[in-house]
Image (cartoon, rainbow, N blue to C red):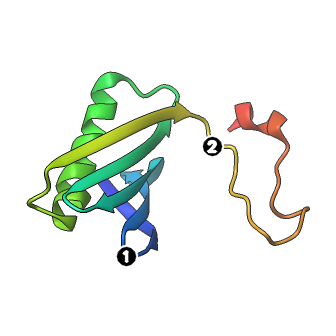
Amino acid sequence: MISFDREVRTPYSETYTILDDGEIVGRVDLHIQGANIHATLCTTADAGDDRIRELIDAVDEQLAMTADPYREDFIVTVWKGVPAGVYGDATADEDTIDLGEIGER
């Protein structure tokens, strides 16, 4: 079952980690602009068209429709790839990874 874990919320945007039976399968950023909702969906490189459609439908039903049920458009940009890490302002040693390790995940 697809579920979402909110990471960030602002007055006009939200970011969620996408989980399927507890496993991370992607991330989605929603940006609300009046009656339009724009989304960036990031999922795994091996996600096929059916899987992408399943994720888009789950985002629409569980997140986008609750933001504005009278919206005019829901526009989704999809990226497929591998996670490369989370970077921040902590310290250089803590916020970088060896890119050679990406294929091992």
Q: CA distance from mark 1 to mark 2?
A: 27 Å
Which label sits in the foreground, 1 or 2? 1
Left or right? Give the position of 57 relative to 97: left
Q: Residue furthest left?
A: 70
What mark, if any, has residue 43 been given in the picture?
Answer: none
* 69 vs 62, nearest the viewer: 69
Numbered disc 1: secondary structure: loop
Image position, residue 9 (x, y; %): 42, 73
Circle 2 crowding by C-alpha within 10 Å: few under 14, some 14–19, many from 20: some
Image position, residue 83 (x, y; %): 63, 43
Q: Residue at x 40, y 53 (%)?
A: 19
In this rendering, the answer to whether 86 lies above or below 53 is below
Q: Residue at x 32, y 57 (%)?
A: 3
Left or right? Give the position of 89 relative to 82: right
Q: Which residue is mark 2?
A: 83
**Residue 13 appears anywhere in the view:** yes
Numbered disc 2: secondary structure: loop
Q: Earlier in the sequence, mark 1 or mark 2?
A: 1
What mark, if any, has residue 11 been given in the picture?
Answer: 1
Q: Residue at x 10, y 61 (%)?
A: 69
Marks 1/2 in contact by CB < 8 Å: the verdict is no
